[in-house]
Amino acid sequence: MRLPKGRGAPESGKNVLGVVLSPVIGIFLTVFLDLLSFGMFIPDIQLRAKALGAQGTAIGATIAVYSLVQLLTAPILGRLSDVAGRRRVLLITTLVSTVAYAVYGQASELWLMIVARGLLGMAGASVGVAFAYMADMTEPKDRAKGMGLIGAAFGLGFILGPVFGVVLLRIAHDSPVLLGSAGAALSLVNLLYVWLLLPESKPKHPGEAVPQFENFRVAFGTPQLAFLLLMFFAINLGFTNLESTYFQLLADPRAVFRLDVDEAKKVGAIVLALVGVLGAFTQGYLVRRLMPVFGEVKLVRAAYFVMTPTFLLVPVAALWFPGILLILLMGVASGLAQPCLSSLISRNAPPRMQGGIFGITQSLGATARLLGPLISNTTFAWRPQLPYIIGAAIIAFPAMGAWRLRQPPLEETAIGDAALTIA
């Protein structure tokens, strides 16, 4: 990928140690380390909250506090990265995550776990900054490929993270202390990596600060950009129905799986690892091969078309066959759609607002993940299949909406990078 011209990106890619490092690889490693530590806690969060006394909606609320804080902080951090630089914001968030994991490891009461989740929500708000960093470092024609690399970093984190998490929990006899210590150590490594090795992608330009309300005005006042953001919100809202109930689904006696708690953690971690492998391969390789041939819009259409029925069938299909095939198919579809949708959002956002727009994007995702666990865990208590029926219905909206999109020419520019028309 070539660095963009005229966007203020550093020419040498040098960091404070003077080491030449590809910025694209640099942000890939930053996101990978962050998601590796985050992924370790996935097998523990839902069942840990239940063990600490939460039930039904309370479990959803414990999970959702992460997204509530992310909702409030993502636009702020995105705008701050536009003004002060991406690297400074990443330094702050990796420091916060180090503290948060240490707190989680000592969470012997529910309120302490909620505090740790809130701190992690603030740290997780930096995802939009990572996407903006990649947008700084790629030209429009390479944007989906760059976003795919970030998605691959997410996938690899989810491959290794849950597996490590299960191993650490078994070593510690289900105590969160070792898990929290390992997460804090990984976040500290990430902090040192960003500080010493990651170059800045966007130098400060005094007078370029964009008021926060201006970011919102552009995001929701521009039809094509607002439409894409609505699709992003809907797909995230639909997927949280699976993410926040899947481990419970495996262990619920009313479902088809009926595993015990320990087996549910093990099987869930294996399934997520397989999904992560396919997701990383899809976003890191397939997107790079398919995007130049088909374009972002056609890939989004095909992927969302596949997601709706597979999501609906997950809770009623036998685990290993055909259930695992459905999960993996959905992972591939999501791996194709996510970087392409992010690319289209980036290409419709002004260069000086990349951080702010992606901050709003992540805030919308956080809103979806805030509402989703509350809805899914409440309905799961009634019937374990309900969250998946609701999720499939929600995903059907962006699946249909994708057919209103038209692929923009690579050389066309509007609001900064490219225009996307809606039929």
Image (cartoon, rainbow, N blue to C red):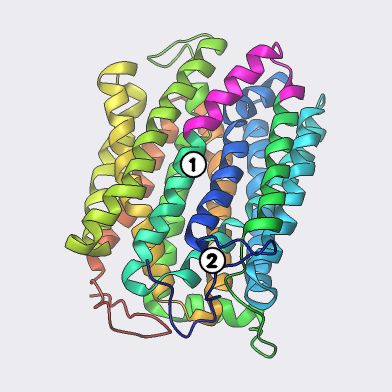
Q: Nearer the viewer, residue 292 or 195?
A: 195
Residue 53 seen from this side: no
- Please state the horizontal and vertical placement of residue 234, each as a whole percent of the image: 42, 54
Q: Nearer the viewer, residue 189 or 170?
A: 189
3 relative to 421 in the view: left or right: right
Left or right: 256, with 120 as reference point: left
Q: Is residue 88 visible?
A: yes
Q: Quadrant of residue 179?
A: top right
- Residue at numbered disc 2: 133
- Residue 343, given in percent of the width and then of the height, sits at 38, 65
Q: Quadrant of residue 181?
A: top right
Q: Amino acid at mark 1?
A: Thr
- In this rendering, the answer to whether 253 lies above or below 33 is above
In this rendering, position of residue 377 left or right of residue 327: right
Predominant secondary structure, magenta span? helix
Q: Which residue is mark 1?
A: 240
Looking at the picture, does residue 275 appear above or below residue 392?
A: above
The structure residue drawn at horizontal position 47% and vertical position 48%, both measured from the top left corner, is 237
The secondary structure type at the circle numbered 2 is helix
Q: Which quarter of the picture shows residue 208? A: bottom right
